[in-house]
Amino acid sequence: MTLYKRREIFSSFSVKVGIVFSRIGLSPNQWTFLTIVPAIIALYFLVEKQFLVAAIFFIISAFIDLVDGSVARVMGKTSRLGAYLDTIMDRYVEGVIVFALLFSGLPGFYLPAYAWIFIYIFGSLMTTYAKSAAKEKELVYEELKGGLLERAERMVILFIGILLASIQPVYLTYVIVILAVLSNISALQRIWIATRE
């Protein structure tokens, strides 16, 4: 199946989600703010080392993140403000989950786990900042994209890591190491793209 066809299937699914959840009566922006609630619950279970339950709430948060955009499109309420709030809440959700990892007692791998977590979140922030700074300094005129990992890919990999931690916590450490390396490579790729532009 081609990527184009997969995108069509996802778009069709998004429309169905929007139709169903628009009947609840919440605005797209209210759905956006709701994404933080299951993320905070996931934080609690990560700290308690109940990784499987944490993964469930993490995926619920990700699903609500899909709902807000789907509802906005179905209701014809897409806006710059909504897109902005969605981006902000995305970073808060990622921050909450990564913060929880600091207290989940993960074993180290050559470096302490907290060092890898810091390198990962720094790379994540730099990936985002490389994009916004390029636009702010007028190096590019369209939104800068590219790099190995965007937020969606980071979240999928992190979700897999949390699931694996329910089998053996060190697996999550390995995943964080991978994220630490790849997120910083992604940031460097975006910096390279911006300077080439």
Image (cartoon, rainbow, N blue to C red):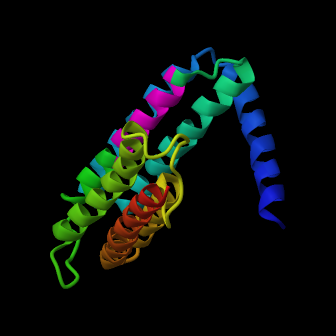
Q: Is residue 27 left or right of residue 193?
A: right
Q: Which residue lies at the image location 39% right of the left edge and 49% below the top edge?
A: 128
Per the picture, the main secondary structure of the magenta-coloured stretch is helix
The number of callouts visible is 0
Tell me the magenta residue range: 81-94
Please name whichever residue, 165 or 131, is drawn nearer the observer in this view of the structure.
131
Q: Is residue 1 left or right of residue 84?
A: right
Query: Magenta includes 192?
Result: no
Q: Position of residue 12 (x, y in %)?
A: 81, 42
Q: Where on the picture, by quarter, is residue 50?
A: bottom left
Q: Considering only vertical position in the picture, is 142 above or below 151?
A: above
Q: Which residue lies at the image location 49% right of the left edge and 21% below the top edge?
A: 81
Query: Magenta includes 86?
Result: yes
Please name whichever residue, 178 or 122, is drawn nearer the observer in this view of the structure.
122
Q: Considering only vertical position in the picture, is 132 above or below 126?
A: above
Q: Which residue lies at the image location 40% right of the left edge and 71% below the top edge?
A: 182
Q: Is residue 76 visible?
A: yes
Please name whichever residue, 111 or 104, is drawn nearer the observer in this view of the structure.
111
Q: Position of residue 87 (x, y in %)?
A: 45, 36
The residue furthest top is 25
Q: Is residue 48 visible?
A: no
The residue furthest bottom is 110
Q: Position of residue 30 (x, y in %)?
A: 49, 20
Please name whichever residue, 9 or 87, is drawn nearer the observer in this view of the structure.
87
Q: Which residue lies at the image location 26% right of the left edge and 58% below the top edge?
A: 122
Quadrant where the N terminus lies? bottom right
Q: Position of residue 78 (x, y in %)?
A: 63, 23
Q: Where on the picture, by quarter, is residue 28?
A: top right
